[in-house]
Amino acid sequence: MFTPDSIEVQGERFTPFITQEQISTRISFMGKQLDKDFANLNPIFIGVLNGSFIFLADLMRHVQIPCEVDFVKLSSYGDKKVSSGNVTTLKKVDARLEGRHIILVEDIVDTGLSMNYMLDEMRTHHPASLSVVTLLHKKEATVHPVDLAYVGFEIPNAFVLGYGLDYAQYGRNLGQIYIVENKK
């Protein structure tokens, strides 16, 4: 697993913030919660690409209930560190969602813009239930409130990467979460 002591991406230095061990422990706990809450409901987990793919893969290895998986792809960041404020759908879900128990899986919720967009879109399919699982939540950055049923870690309003999260598509392969160093 690629877990360097620090890494430089786009001219900025990042240092470890949440270790692979902390992530694994938390995901195991979240999987047990989901097993309990969705027993006998055959939920469909919908990963928000690209960032959630590693988190969703690890989460699926800790979920023991019958379930399905699909993906949606949104764009709001491009190669920037902040959202453009415009959300567009690049890939829609292939599965039929009406009457299903939908669990949206996101890597990070910060402003809440993208997640609110996704929730509005999912509601048009008339699901039986709709829940959100996020690995990270920047609570102090939230402008558009979102009901998050399962949160791995609440983090400060700082730029992070690794474990699926990127900076201009770099850093997704890091085995833990890194945070940008403060410039002095």
Image (cartoon, helix red, strand yellow):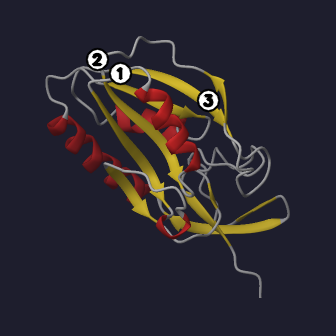
Residue 37's label in the rendered image is none
Mark in the foreground, 2 or 3: 2
Mark in the foreground, 3 or 1: 1
Residue 73's label in the rendered image is 3
Residue under label 1, please give it. 126
Residue at horizontal 51 percent and vertical 12 percent from the top: 94
Callout 2, which amino acid?
Gly
Query: The residue tagged with tag 3: helix, strand or loop?
Result: strand
Q: Where is residue 10 in the image (x, y as percent from the top left)?
A: 84, 58
Above or below — where is 156 with respect to 166?
below
Residue at horizontal 45 percent and vertical 56 percent from the top: 145
Q: Position of residue 132 (x, y in %)?
A: 38, 42
Q: How crowded is mark 3: few (under 14 residues within 10 Å), some or many (20 or more)?
A: some
Q: How many marks?
A: 3
Of the two numbered discs 2 and 3 on the same chain, state the one appearing first in sequence. Answer: 3
Left or right placement of residue 76 versus residue 29 in this view: right
Q: Position of residue 27 (x, y in %)?
A: 34, 48
Q: How crowded is mark 1: few (under 14 residues within 10 Å), some or many (20 or more)?
A: some
Above or below — where is 138 with respect to 36?
below
**Residues at badges 2 and 3 in contact (C-beta under 8 Å)?**
no
Query: The residue tagged with tag 1: helix, strand or loop?
Result: loop
Which quadrant is the C terminus positioned in? bottom right
What is the spatial separation of the Cα atoms under label 2 and label 3, in whole angstroms? 22 Å
Query: The residue tagged with tag 2: helix, strand or loop?
Result: loop
Residue under label 2, please give it. 99
Above or below — where is 12 with respect to 37?
below
Callout 3, which amino acid?
Lys
